Amino acid sequence: MTSRLFPLGRPVPREDLVGRQDFMKNLHNPLSEGQSVMLAGPRRVGKTSLAMEILRQFQEKNYDTAYFDLFRYNTKRALAVAIIDACAHIRDGTGESVRADSCTSSLRAEMNSEERDGDALLIESFQLPERIAREGGRRLVFVFDETQEIIRLAGKPTLQTIQERFQHHTSASYLFLGSPFATVGTSLPMPPIAVGSWQKYITQKFNSKDIAASERLVLEILTLSGGYPQDTMLLCTEIYSAVLEEGASALSMEYVRVGYERTQTAMAIIFDEVLNHLGKTPVNRQVLVQLAKNQRLYAGRQHNPNEIKRAVDTLVTRMIIDKTDRGSYRFLEPMFKHYLIHRLA
Ligand SMILES: Nc1ncnc2c1ncn2[C@@H]1O[C@H](COP(=O)(O)OP(=O)(O)O)[C@@H](O)[C@H]1O
Ligand SMILES: [Mg+2]
């Protein structure tokens, strides 16, 4: 592939992490004081990218760190074993390279992991980071990504026990990503990336390939993408391909248009999925489409006002829309709005 200029489909390397400098400071303070933070946000806003950079910075300061993507574990036992192994590495001072399958740790034997019941093992394993931080005087930051998956892995009672115990963890720090998992620490929404930061980044990237990018066109790109992280990167990638195909040396409105069309086509699969998920409650989908088309929400008789209100709240909680100062609603992804208007019958 030619267009590797704008990173996509993986956490971005630190030099491509746009506009998160200030926000990162808000995360550093609580985490370095043994507090935990929940970063709430939908997919593709850059939670994992941000967490990776945070972990890197803590590693530089000699913290012990570990990262768990809950999506990757099929069973509670597998997750428990991964946590146990990570803690064993830290306790035994074998470095921060943490892999679930990489060792048969003494801790694992200690915890009788083969014989113990999965729920008990999971509850115990979640106690380990705190134990190690406290007893070993270590400074730990653990990231749990895709935390909504815990519901699939552990039943409600187990989850509740884990959450209750977390309240007493004051030495180990956790960064949770996804949707609410533990009711400890602060919960922060992912802030939007400032237009100025994007502008500078996009202009420099094109310029680094000897492609001129006028301020007007860069702003046009950002209007189309709304600065939504993945949409912006994909749009830039598609525009870059279009420019390369023609061997051009400057962006033009035409390349932006072609890039936008291709981006919409590529995003349709993802948007279908979002819609599919929401469509399980029909009123959600209906309200969403009405909002996209600027139609009045409470005019129809099909759903009662309470149902409609609840649907709006769901869309806000899922960070698909947010409320503007003027009391109307705005799509966080203008491309999703475009898709709802133009690609649905
Ligand atoms: N701060 C950022 N700057 C630039 N691009 C970003 C940023 N955050 C995310 N992206 C883009 O969004 C994509 C998804 O990011 P990721 O961190 O995986 O999101 P999440 O974990 O929220 O699903 C990345 O591959 C990249 O293209
Ligand atoms: Mg992620």
Image: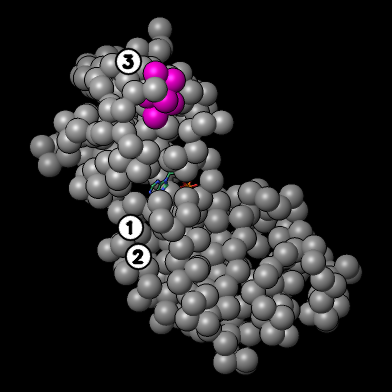
| Residue for badge 2 | 24
Decide which of tag 3 and tag 2 comes sooner along the chain. Answer: 2
| Residue for badge 3 | 341
Residues shaded magenta: 240-246
For image coordinates 24% across by 43% down, the residue present is: 199
Decide which of tag 1 and tag 3 comes sooner along the chain. Answer: 1
Q: Dot 1, how many residues are within 10 Å of its Cα: few (below 14), some (14-19), or many (20+)? A: some
| Disc 3 residue type (three-letter) | Ile
Q: Dot 2, how many residues are within 10 Å of its Cα: few (below 14), some (14-19), or many (20+)? A: some
Residue 24 lies, in percent from the top left, at 35, 65
- Residue 7 is left or right of residue 156, and the answer is left
Check whether the beta carbons of the residues at disc 2 and disc 1 lie within 8 A of each other.
Answer: yes
Q: Nearer the viewer, residue 154 or 247?
A: 247
Mark 1: C-beta under 8 Å from nearest atom of ligand 1 = yes
Check whether the beta carbons of the residues at disc 3 and disc 2 lie within 8 A of each other.
Answer: no
Residue 166 in sight from this viewpoint: no
| Disc 1 residue type (three-letter) | Arg
Majority SS type along the magenta span: helix
How far is disc 2 from disc 1 in space, using C-alphas? 6 Å
For image coordinates 47% across by 43% down, the residue present is: 7
Q: In which quarter of the image is the N terminus?
A: top right
Q: In which quarter of the image is the C terminus?
A: top left
Q: How many labels does the image show?
A: 3
Residue 35 lies, in percent from the top left, at 43, 76
Q: Which of 12 and 331 is in front in this view?
A: 12
Q: Which mark is residue 334?
A: none
Q: Indicate whether residue 2 is drawn in magenta.
A: no
Residue 267 in sight from this viewpoint: yes
| Residue for badge 1 | 20
- Residue 134 is left or right of residue 23, and the answer is right
